[in-house]
Amino acid sequence: MPDYFKLSIGNFAQDWSNTALLNTTDNWSQVASIVGYRGDDIISGTAINPGTLTGDGTVTIDINVNQTNPNTNTSGGVSEFEIANPVVALQGSGTADAPSLVFHLDTTGRESVVFSFNARDIDGSADNAAQQIAVQYHICESGADQFTRGLYLRRDEPRHGHAIDRGERDPAEQRQRPKPGPGARDHVQCRRQ
């Protein structure tokens, strides 16, 4: 389990230009507060809105490191691409039903948290499918964990090289919930199907 980034001391940011952070398959230990999961056995169909997926599936940590050509990568899951603008990418497959990146954030002392990211299509091959991406908030308080829906992004047609900047405020139910005690920890999960 990675350490939670304490938002009370500042904003969290991650870019992927330092390709040395991910240099061992399935090892996220050099990346602070983020883990990628393959997302096995969450669903049995295809083209399902990833925002409706609230289970963990089998929690298989996943990162295919040092990839250089997104057009020929077919393994599915979470991959690091050492291309002109390095990036971590999500690709569904028969095994990787709903790969995801989970950001471990401690929101104690913060309100109106904004999660923003740049979603871009790096696959220019013939297998360039339409993408669905969901951002979910996993609120961990005393008692049962709870997923709440956040941003849902669907591109109906693939556009290689196209980037979309997205920002998402924490949902109203998170802003209005009673303030948890010390050590409140939330997960933000970016999931693709």
Image (cartoon, grey):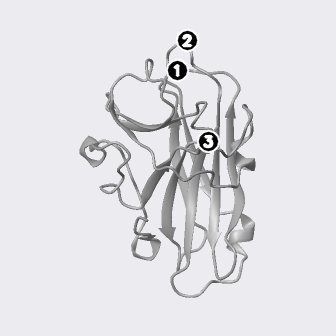
Q: Nearer the viewer, mark 3 or mark 2?
A: 3
Image point 31% across, 45% down: which residue?
A: 22
Q: Real-space Cα distance between discs 1 and 3?
A: 21 Å
Q: Real-space Cα distance between discs 2 and 1?
A: 11 Å
Q: Could you tell me the amino acid type at mark 3? A: Ala
Mark 1 or mark 3: which comes first in sequence?
3
- Identify residue for label 3: 98
Mark 2 or mark 1: which comes first in sequence?
2
- Identify residue for label 2: 126
Q: Which mark is residue 160?
A: 1
In the image, residue 19 above or below residue 33: above
Q: Percent from the top left, x then y, of residue 72?
A: 43, 18
Q: Nearer the viewer, mark 2 or mark 1?
A: 2
Q: Which mark is residue 41?
A: none
Q: Percent from the top left, x then y, of residue 172?
A: 73, 67
Which of 57/8 is in front?
57
Q: Could you tell me the amino acid type at mark 1? A: His
Q: Which image quadrant is residue 165 in?
A: top right
Crowd around label 1: few <14 · some 14–19 · many ≥20 (10 Å):
some
Q: Which image quadrant is residue 55 in?
A: bottom right
Q: Disc 2 on helix, strand or loop? A: loop
In the image, residue 191 above or below residue 109: above
Q: Which image quadrant is residue 113 in?
A: bottom right
State left or right for residue 30 relative to residue 136: left
